[in-house]
Amino acid sequence: MSGYAPSHQDELDEAEGPSPLWRALRLTVWAVVSFALTFVELVAEWVAPLLLLGGLAWLAVVRVVGTLHLEPEIQQFLQYVPSQLLVAGTVWTPVGLITQGITLLAIVAGCRTLNRLISREV
């Protein structure tokens, strides 16, 4: 007896890990998920400031127009500044646009976090 443990090289070769096909499939799935997250992130990153700034500007105009005391001839034209719009069956308000902009910013943060976790996983 030599005192050495038996060689388990054959068992180690079999237990290296998943097959190359499984690794390729896993990588493809994570790549598609990462692509979708990046696409959503880029669209939301582009639209969020537009909604946020548009809502803030609209809210400011509505508030300023509401406090102005002008001649009656001019005042009648200022009544046409809408406080809400109906677009394709959806009611848009300044506060609603601001809320949607902030929600899209949160979605951007979530997509970036998930992409970072995916990059560490793969």
Image (cartoon, rainbow, N blue to C red):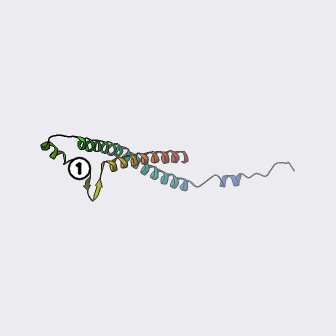
Q: Position of residue 51 (x, y in %)?
A: 32, 46
Q: Position of residue 25 (x, y in %)?
A: 51, 55
Residue most toward the right? 1
**Front residue (pair 57, 88):** 57
109 relative position to 53: left or right: right
9 relative position to 59: left or right: right
Q: Position of residue 95 (x, y in %)?
A: 33, 48
Indicate the secondary structure of the residue bearing disc 1.
Answer: loop
Place residue 10 in its image quadrant: bottom right
The residue depicted at 39 percent of the width and 46 percent of the height is: 102
Residue density around tag 1, few if under 14, some if 14–19, many if 20 or more, within 10 Å: few
**Front residue (pair 109, 3):** 109
23 relative position to 38: left or right: right
**Front residue (pair 66, 102):** 66
Q: Position of residue 74 (x, y in %)?
A: 14, 42
Vertical relation: 21 (above or below) 52: below
Residue most toward the left? 73
Q: Amino acid at mark 1?
A: Pro
Q: Which residue is mark 1?
A: 82
The residue depicted at 15 percent of the width and 46 percent of the height is: 76
The residue depicted at 48 percent of the width and 53 percent of the height is: 28
**Total number of numbered discs in the rendering:** 1
The residue depicted at 42 percent of the width and 51 percent of the height is: 36
